[in-house]
Image (tube, helix red, strand yellow):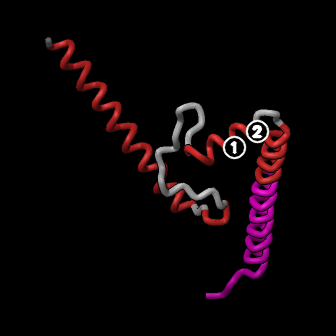
Amino acid sequence: MEMNQKLFDDCTQLYKVERQKEKDVLKGRDDAWKKIHNLAIGNPQYKEMSTLINTNGVAGGFTSGNDDFDPDPEDLTAEKMAKEADQVKKSTRKEQGQAFNKTKIRIAS
């Protein structure tokens, strides 16, 4: 079977354009997070909160609940994010199920 060179070139060009758009979007997100980080550093309460978070791992009584948290963005992969999302969904469903069972028990009583 022969290859349609024009179709191949068109598809290749489209692929390259889409990849470049993806890179631009990621760069825009990265720039936005850097801007937010710089604004946070400029906040007078930044030192106090960063010390509290670094010492206790707690901010206002909130913990991430994930002991494997790694803030390095280069380590983030779609697979890791999907795995963590699944874990959160499972724990949320479990908590909702427990709350539902408690409600059922109260109604039955």
First to last magenta residue range: 1-28
Residue at point 43% right, 50% down?
A: 86
Q: Is residue 14 above or below residue 30?
A: below
Q: Is residue 37 left or right of residue 52?
A: right
Kindly identify which numbered label has been placed on residue 61. none
Question: What is the secondary structure assignment of the residue under circle 2?
Answer: helix
Say which amino acid is labelled 1.
Ser
Residue identifier under label 2: 46
Identify which residue, 89 or 46, lies in the foreground: 46
Residue identifier under label 1: 50
Residue at point 85% right, 39% down?
A: 42
Question: What is the secondary structure assignment of the residue under circle 1?
Answer: helix
Q: Is residue 108 left or right of residue 46?
A: left
**Place of residue 77 in the rendered image (x, y in percent of width and height, measured from the top left):** 58, 63
Residue at point 37% right, 44% down?
A: 90
Say which amino acid is labelled 2.
Tyr
Q: Residues within 10 Å of mark 1 (few under 14, many from 20)?
A: some
Residue at point 21% right, 19% down?
A: 104
**Place of residue 19 in the rendered image (x, y in percent of width and height, measured from the top left):** 75, 65
Q: Is residue 75 left or right of residue 36?
A: left
For the N terminus, give its image quadrant.
bottom right
Q: Quadrant of residue 40?
A: top right
Q: Is residue 101 above or below residue 49?
A: above
